[in-house]
Amino acid sequence: MPGTIISVAEVTHVSKHGFWLLLDAEELLVPFEHFPWFKNATIAQLSDVQWPAPDHLYWPQLDADLSVESIRNPSMFPLVSKKTG
């Protein structure tokens, strides 16, 4: 009986502007400007990413879920909450 197929996602580079995420042959920039909840994460936390479904990414140490499409087209997924104060 086959097990669950999980694709491999890999963080390839981190800078002050964001991080690059390799999904098979596609490399995507995850800019902190659009995804601020990753800005203060450690490299270990960012690197611990799972790709359990074609459009679903999960960072267990950060308890963060993202749609791959939201990285490709962040303007289609505006932030729901904003930091106040």
Image: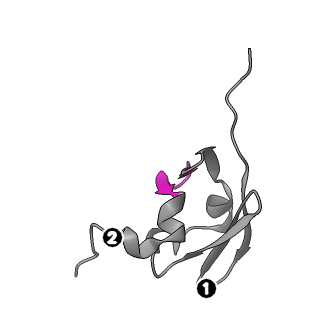
Q: Residue at x 54, y 59 (%)?
A: 68
User: Which comes sooner in the sequence, label 1 or label 2?
Assistant: 1
In this rendering, the answer to whether 62 lies above or below 28 is: above
Label 1 and label 2: CA atoms lie apart by 20 Å
Q: Which amino acid does label 2 sit on?
A: Leu
Closer-to-camera residue (25/44): 25
Tag of residue 26: none
Q: In this view, does 53 lie above or below 20?
A: above
Q: Where is residue 19 in the image (x, y as percent from the top left)?
A: 64, 74
Q: Quadrant of residue 25?
A: bottom right
> Residue at 22% across / 82% down in the picture?
85
- Residue 9, quarter of picture: bottom right
Identify which residue, 66 or 63, lies in the foreground. 66
**Quick one: label 1, few (<14), some, or many (20+) residues within 10 Å?**
few
- Tell me if residue 45 is in the magenta stretch: no
Question: Residue at 71% across / 45% down in the picture?
Answer: 7
Three-letter code for the amino acid on which mark 1 is drawn: Lys
User: Which residue occupies the foreground of this view, 45 or 7?
Assistant: 7
Total of numbered circles in the picture? Answer: 2
Answer few, some or many: residues within 10 Å of disc 2's Cα (few below 14, many 20 plus, some between 14 and 19): few
Tell me which residue sits at (63%, 48%) in the image: 50
Which residues are drawn in magenta? 57-67
- Residue placed under numbered mark 2 in the picture: 79
Magenta span: predominant SS is strand
Residue 83 x %, y % = 28, 76
In this view, 17 is above or below 12: below
Expressed as whole percent of the image width and height from the top left, the position of residue 27 reads 70, 69
For mark 2, give the secondary structure: loop
**The N terminus sits in image quarter:** top right
Secondary structure, mark 1, is loop
Q: Name the residue under label 1.
A: 16
